[in-house]
Amino acid sequence: TANGEIYNQDDFTVAHRTLPFNTYLKVTNLENNKSVVVRVNDRGPYIAPRSLDLSRTAARCLDSEYTGVVAYQAVVLQQNAPQMTLKPLSLTTQDLANAKSEILVSQFQ
């Protein structure tokens, strides 16, 4: 990946062109309201009009593994850590419920 990690399709990760590495997003499939929390660890996608590229496991959680492109909403849950880490952040339901800053990154349809 662009941040130096070895890509693992089973991790909850996402590629984004500009968001800082280790930023956590809540991505919701607008067609079925299923959501997943992912961590930015790569750059891309570079095919218009796509703006996120989810790992295989994250795409499965949204029921978008086979459809490929879906309408979604992405919200920043936690800004990146100042240093790179290979250890994922352990988010609890309470952490998500009390997220202090939620920024709409994109709503693509």
Image: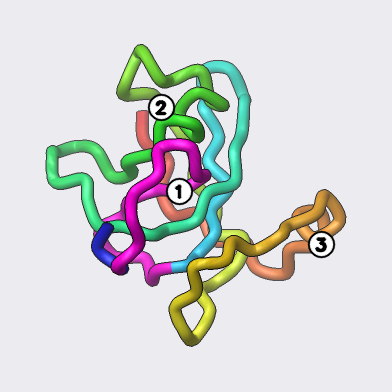
Which residue occupies 41% across, 27% down?
71
Q: Quadrant of residue 95?
A: bottom right
Please give the residue where the numbered disc 1 appears in the rendered image.
13
Residue 23 drawn above or below residue 33: below
Classify mark 1: helix, strand or loop.
Answer: strand
Which residue occupies 24% across, 63% down?
2
Q: CA distance from mark 2 to mark 1?
A: 18 Å
Q: Position of residue 17 (x, y in %)?
A: 25, 58
Residue 47 drawn above or below residue 29: below
Determine the main secondary structure of the stretch shown in magenta. Answer: loop
Residue 18 shown in magenta: yes
Classify mark 2: helix, strand or loop.
Answer: loop
Q: Residues within 10 Å of mark 3 (few under 14, many from 20)?
A: few
On-image quarter of the N terminus: bottom left
Tell me if 8 is positioned left or right of 51 in this view.
right
Residue 18 drawn above or below residue 33: below
Q: Residue furthest right?
A: 94
Question: Which region shows up in magenta?
Answer: 4-21
Sequence-wise, the earlier of marks 3 and 1 is: 1
From the viewer's perspective, is the residue at label 2 or at label 1 nearer? Answer: 1
Q: Position of residue 15 (x, y in %)?
A: 33, 51
Which residue occupies 64% across, 63% down?
89
Q: Position of residue 6 (x, y in %)?
A: 33, 55
Please give the residue where the numbered disc 2 appears in the rendered image.
71
Classify mark 3: helix, strand or loop.
Answer: loop
Instruction: Name the foreground residue: 107 vs 5.
Output: 5
Residue 84 shown in magenta: no
Instruction: Name the foreground residue: 105 vs 61.
Output: 61
Residue 98 is tagged as 3
